[in-house]
Amino acid sequence: MATLLDTIAGGHLVEAHRPYPRRIVDAPLWQALGAGLHEGHWRLLGLWGEPAAVHMALLDEAAGLPAVASLACPDGTFPSVAQYHPPASRLERALCDLTGLAATAAPDARPWLDHGRWDLRHPLGQRLPAATEVPPYAFLTADGEGLHQIPVGPVHAGIIEPGHFRFTANGEAVVRLEQRLGYVHKGIEALMTGASIERAARLAGRTSGDSTVAYAWALARAVEAALGATVPERAVWLRALMAELERLANHFGDIGAICNDAAFALMLAHCGVLREQVLRAANACFGHRLMMDRVVPGGVEVAPGPLDTTPIRNLIDVATKAFPALVKLYDNKASLQDRTVGTGIVRPALARQYGCGGYVGRASGLAFDARRQLAYPPYDGLRFEVPVLREGDVNARVWIRIREVEQSLALVGQILKALPPDGLTRIPLAEVDGPSEGVGLVEGFRGDILAWVRLDAGARVGRCHLRDPSWFQWPLLEAAIEGNIVADFPLCNKSFNCSYSGHDL
């Protein structure tokens, strides 16, 4: 089997794209890449568009090397990738909403992000006036005796973000779930167009608030790749320190919340305390509970001088002592096991087809972790394991989080030992004298986050694309709930904890 690089070798190489190659391909080669995705030769990382071109990022897992393929669309269309590879479908629908470029032979041409509420159409393409009439969204049907539909959302009973879930059920059993997302589209990529690097970094950090460090780091890596910048060593370690604190805070919160949805609030209380301690330590060391705007292109934005890491060391000490008892509590609670074991199963084959990353993928047999497979600094010099299970149920997704908490606690310890006590944390970025492009891939707590950026002269963002891991996880939630009872949906949904904001962008 030819490698990904061999396959796209016939395309025109874009010299200004770093660190991974981008090649401009023709339609037959574009379709061949789609067929290769169908055959499982590589993994889809992203699919996005501009007014007259589409781009597709792929990963050759065997070679450990991503690449980007681009196709010009002079007539406003491109061959659908989803006709070969269903995980591309929502990406194509969003791409069409944003740019107006239509995928020919697409299996699903319904709008995705555009609900007909914007004051224009195609904000990233040839902008058109908004349609005067918007037809009702055509949900998929399921026919059968006794079937009924249950609409849920987009406004929910809690403080979660908006999303609509259309259940078709036979009594209590779910026959089909269809999601409708896009309610929190913020137009981040449109706001980035023409923005300075500093403003783009702030926007990236607000794509999904619980992953602000990971998003900012992904964008920073893309910008630094485009400019050929090498950030100070101390900044690299501080970025990893913040990323692991972000992972810990979210995993503590998720473990507690999943148990709470299984009517075991005690775990939520204890995990909530640990999460709060992580946020307080982050605030004490970095001046912000979520560490927003601390990772910037060129380094990190922290107070000058030595960093007092005492709050983090105390946190690690407390969490290391307290967490094993919580794990034991979870493991020994029969009422919890009754709700989580065998519930909401994602089959490994489906997870692999969708290239699903993060704890959802790793609970279904996929070992991908960008920190390991792409080994970006400083993870290339750190010792850690990537936990993997194959059961694919709620219980497995909880255990992956538990093991990742243990790994992150150990990683923070390693990082604190290796962190230079003082020194430069940020460098000025080079002038941009012509278009330059970069791509960055960072492992957030949900999974891998992709950032792609093109910088124009004057260091302005010509185009930026951000891809949340939830794009490949939301569809699997639809599959996971099938055959379960409706009452188990909140539990399944929480065990996924997909991002609405990161998806809707």
Image (cartoon, grey):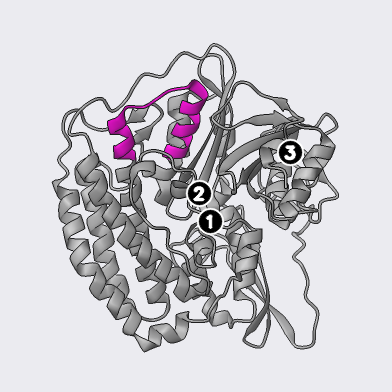
Residue type pointed to by label 1: Gly
Which quarter of the figure has residue 121? top right
Residue 443, percent from left and from top:
45, 48
First of labels 3, 2 by sequence position: 3
- The stretch in magenta equals 216-239
Residue 409, percent from left and from top:
27, 56
Residue type pointed to by label 3: Thr
**Nearer mark to the viewer, of 3 and 2:** 3
104 in the magenta segment: no
- Taking the image as drawn, is residue 165 in sight? no
Q: Tags 3 and 2 in contact by the CB under 8 Å rule? A: no
Which SS class for mark 1?
loop
User: Which secondary structure is most common in the magenta stretch?
Assistant: helix
**Residue 374: assigned label:** none
Count the numbered circles shown: 3
**Nearer mark to the viewer, of 3 and 1:** 3
- Residue receiving disc 2: 448
Residue 489, percent from left and from top:
54, 75
228 in the magenta segment: yes
- Residue receiving disc 3: 7
Residue type pointed to by label 2: Asp
- Taking the image as drawn, is residue 423 in sight? yes
Residue 196, percent from left and from top:
48, 23
**Residue 357: assigned label:** 1
